Amino acid sequence: MTTLRLAPGAAASRILGVGSFQPERIVTNHELSERMDTTDEWIRERVGIVERRFAAKDQKLVDMAVTAGAKALADAGLSPSDADTVILANCTMPTPIPNGAAQVADRIGVKAAGAFDLNAACAGFCYALGTASDLVRAGSARRVLVIGAEKLTDWVDHEDRANAIIFADGAGAAVVGPADEPGIGPVVWGSAGDLTDMIRLRDDRWIFQEGQSVFRWATTRIAPIALRALEAAGVAPADVDVLIPHQANLRIVESIAKKLRAHGAREDMVVADDIVYSGNTSSASIPMAMDHMRAAGRVKPGDVALLVGFGAGLSYAAQVVICP
């Protein structure tokens, strides 16, 4: 029998640096109320959003991903040549071919990179982070640039009040590399393929979601996934310093936090609320929130963070990480 040789890997992996990018244009609730039947009060009460960022017409998903990825490498103290793999989590590329990751890698300067796109919608960053961690630990990659980037405004019917108030554009990124001590816990993931109609494309063109059904699913099914991720990492709820769920809806975020506290999470656990000023940016929301919270001093190096992604598919994923 032939025995295969394994590539020398790492005992553990960690996040080495993070970065993010948002377009310049700020769109307030008041601006939306001028072109559709809505109000600032209605939007705040329903989803918790005050404003969001829209990309310019000529600003591409890849452009935003390049900026966020370059910032993450710089934050890690690395040059592009130090990375060998790029994973681009997204669900809003204008076309499936060519993939975005190879374009991003080339423009940043990560030459001859292993590069692929990953579509798990709003759970995409957690899926990509888990994949990157396993690549590093297996020895298949040395350092992986993981990016979540979306231009959702290309896929939103701006006359559809229920969805146009929610979605926005942006990118967030993290660099994953080897570590002496575990810095990324096992990913706990799954899907509910029987519920795919809850979030889908309408007329093969516009994002559509059954808001109330998604809300009920997220507020009942996601907290248990988060608890499973804690168990897989050997971490108690009371050990969590920061909760960073996908920024889908402030009410969903608050519901998840409440249920975790009912299982022992601390009252002083910091909870990401980037949704308020960034909107729902799908796969970009978790890394973008982490970067914003760190810049604001709400997250510090060494903090134990619980990441939880969920969305179309219906796909979900969670893992515990040590903040860089």
Image (cartoon, rainbow, N blue to C red):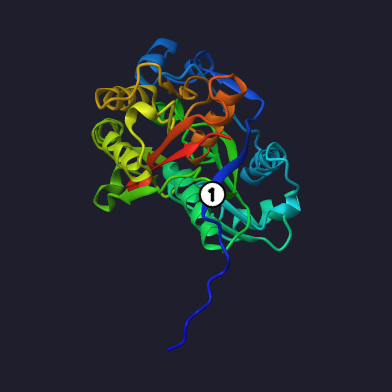
Residue 79, position in %: x, y? 76, 47
> Disc 1 marks which residue?
13
The number of numbered badges drawn on the structure is 1
The residue at 43%/45% (across/down) is 185
In-front residue for pair 214/83 = 83
In-front residue for pair 189/96 = 189
**Outermost bottom residue:** 1
Residue 196, position in %: x, y? 30, 48
**Can the viewer see residue 206?**
no
Name the element at disc 1. strand
Q: Quadrant of the C terminus?
A: top right
Residue 285, position in %: x, y? 50, 34
In-front residue for pair 102/302 = 302
- Residue type marked 1: Ser
**Outermost front residue:** 180
The residue at 61%/43% (across/down) is 61
In the picture shown, does residue 315 fall above or below 164?
below
Q: Residues within 10 Å of mark 1 (few under 14, many from 20)?
A: many
In the picture shown, does residue 34 fall above or below 265?
above
- Left or right of 309? Residue 213 is left
**Can the viewer see residue 235?**
yes
